[in-house]
Image: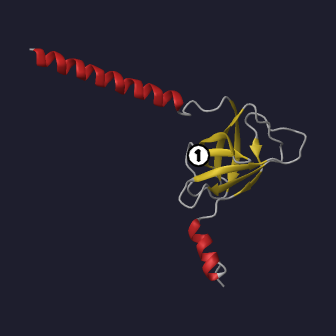
Amino acid sequence: MGRNIVETIVGALVLVVAGLFVFYAFSKSDRTGPDGYELVARFGRIDGLKRGADVTLSGVKVGSVTGFSLDSKTYQAVVRLAVAANVNLPADTHAKIVSESLLGGMVVVLEPGNDKQMLKNGGEIEHTQDSIPLTELIAKFMFGSTGSK
């Protein structure tokens, strides 16, 4: 009978510790997203870009990718970006999809322009640069060109 009580207490302690771990993990994660505004950018290709990928400005995370879809008329990828409210971006901002590292995922890098007018919630970043697949870069390096003659 004494052994059942000990097992019950140990089981309860394990559940409490697991609950505390889950609470800590959710409190430290970035799941809620930044309080801010949403922008849209259109790209010819978004190879490797995932929902939740970082949006950076000068190497600092200022938002994340919230989703993407395909424009059925232009066949471009429409990427939705959530940007922090304290980041005001000029209307002529450039967006590029680049690799975080050789083994890392893709991120969206923002390069602000000089326009006096700022992008607002629901605005569109018009100047974009598509992602370049790693295999294409290797082919350019090895063979000088990927285009056929």
Q: Three-letter amino acid code at disc 1?
A: Ala
Is 97 drawn above or below residue 118 in the view shown? below
For mark 1, does the 10 Å Cα neighbourhood hold few (<14), some (14 to 19), or many (20 or more) residues? some
Is 148 drawn above or below residue 76 in the view shown? below
Colour treatment of the image: secondary structure
Give 26 or 36, whichever is nearer the viewer: 26
* Residue on which the image places disc 1: 53
Is 103 drawn above or below residue 42 in the view shown? below
Residue 92 percent coordinates (x, y): 83, 47
Residue 87 percent coordinates (x, y): 76, 36
Q: If the image is split into quadrants, where does the N terminus sit?
A: top left
In what element is the residue under mark 1? loop
Give 71 or 88, whichever is nearer the viewer: 88
Residue 84 percent coordinates (x, y): 70, 34
- Residue depicted at x 35% and y 25%: 17
Residue 75 visible in the picture: no
Residue farthest bottom in this picture: 149
Residue 10 visible in the picture: yes
Residue farthest right in this picture: 116
* Circle count: 1
Is 121 drawn above or below residue 132 in the view shown? above
Residue farthest left in this picture: 1
Q: If the image is split into quadrants, where does the C terminus sit?
A: bottom right
- Residue depicted at x 64% and y 76%: 140
- Residue depicted at x 65% and y 57%: 98
Residue 36 percent coordinates (x, y): 70, 30
